Image (cartoon, rainbow, N blue to C red):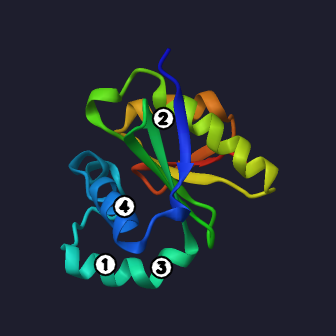
Amino acid sequence: MNKIKLNQLSKLNLKEKFSIFYKYRFNKDYLKYNINKKKFNRNESIIWFKQKIKLKKLFAITLNKKIIGLIIYNLNNKYYSITIDDKYRNMGYGYKALVKFIEILKKKRLKLITIVSKKNKNSIHLHKKLTDNFKNYKKDFIFFKIL
């Protein structure tokens, strides 16, 4: 059976972490629904990444030892984002990964919030399965408090 795993990328070196981060953070679908739609080039991004990585926790979503997605958690403001590769969407993997992620954060007594585009119907559906605590944010987004 295909089992989703969540692996924190703390043991990888900076270059390996950045490579995974860049692939998912600047995925065209991720940018389409993000508040900040600007795509930065690799050079600009690596500078930013080096400055901010201590405030971020990266979790690879793996299936059969293959990375199929990424969860980025901001320790500073408790926001997170999740991205799943196109061919693995709508199969329940994102939900399973988030349930595992929530378990990790509960143990550490950390909060979890996110903002979802109203156009991103799949993400809204996913988050409504996890919490009843949501409200409109600006005109095009919904704010979800999960923990």
Identify the disc placed on residue 21.
Answer: 4
Q: Secondary structure at mark 4?
A: helix
Residue at 40% from the left image edge and 65% from the top image edge: 17
Q: Is residue 14 visible?
A: yes
What kind of residue is marked 4? Phe
Q: Is 11 situated left or right of 24 in this image?
A: right
Identify the disc placed on residue 124.
Answer: 2
Q: Which residue in the structure is indicated by mark 3?
A: 52
Q: Is residue 83 visible?
A: no
What kind of residue is marked 3? Lys
Q: Of label 4 and label 3, which has the lower sequence position?
A: 4
Q: Of label 3 and label 2, which has the lower sequence position?
A: 3
Label 2: few (<14), some (14–19) or many (≥20) C-alpha neighbours in 10 Å: some
Compare residues 60 and 86 and report the one nearer the observer.
Answer: 60
Compare residues 50 and 37 and report the one nearer the observer.
Answer: 50
Q: Nearer the viewer, mark 2 or mark 1?
A: 1
What kind of residue is marked 1? Ile
Whole-number angstrom distance, CA of label 2 to CA of label 4: 23 Å
Q: Which residue in the structure is indicated by mark 1?
A: 46
Q: Of label 2 and label 1, which has the lower sequence position?
A: 1
Compare residues 24 and 67 and report the one nearer the observer.
Answer: 67
What kind of residue is marked 2? Ile
